[in-house]
Amino acid sequence: MVCPNLETCPFINNPDGKLNDDIIKYRNKFCNADYEKCARFILSNTTVEVPVDLAPDEIKRLEKLMKT
């Protein structure tokens, strides 16, 4: 199942072209498959603002953000 935030995710829809190889990896692993495990998706379902640079696999950082 595709992530419902895919079209509006500023990390994945990176306009400056940086991290292209990583973006492809993240799309395959999270956006088009296990989006429920994406740090960005998880945080977006809370009252904490999602940092633009938070990568989908940054679970440790997610945990810190959720504690604040």
Image (cartoon, rainbow, N blue to C red):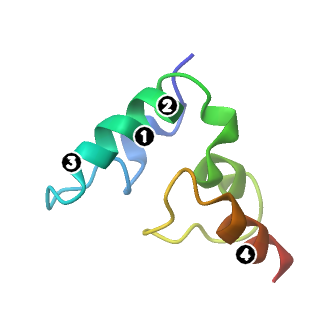
Q: Residues within 10 Å of mark 1 (few under 14, many from 20)?
A: many
For badge 2, the amino acid type reads Lys
Q: To which quarter of the image does residue 59 belong?
A: bottom right
The residue that mark 1 highlights is: 26
The residue that mark 2 highlights is: 29
Closer to the chain start, of discs 4 and 2, is 2
Residue 65's tag is: 4
Q: Is residue 43 left or right of residue 40?
A: right
Indicate whether 38 appears above or below 52. Answer: above
Residue under the image location 54 percent in, 31 percent down: 4
Give the CA separation, mark 1 to mark 4: 20 Å
Q: Residues within 10 Å of mark 4 (few under 14, many from 20)?
A: some
Asked which secondary structure carries label 3, the reply is: helix
Q: Is residue 67 left or right of residue 44?
A: right
Give the CA separation, mark 3 to mark 4: 26 Å
Give the CA separation, mark 2 to mark 3: 14 Å
Q: To which quarter of the image does residue 24 belong?
A: top left
The residue that mark 3 highlights is: 20
For badge 3, the amino acid type reads Asn
Residue under the image location 35 percent in, 47 percent down: 12
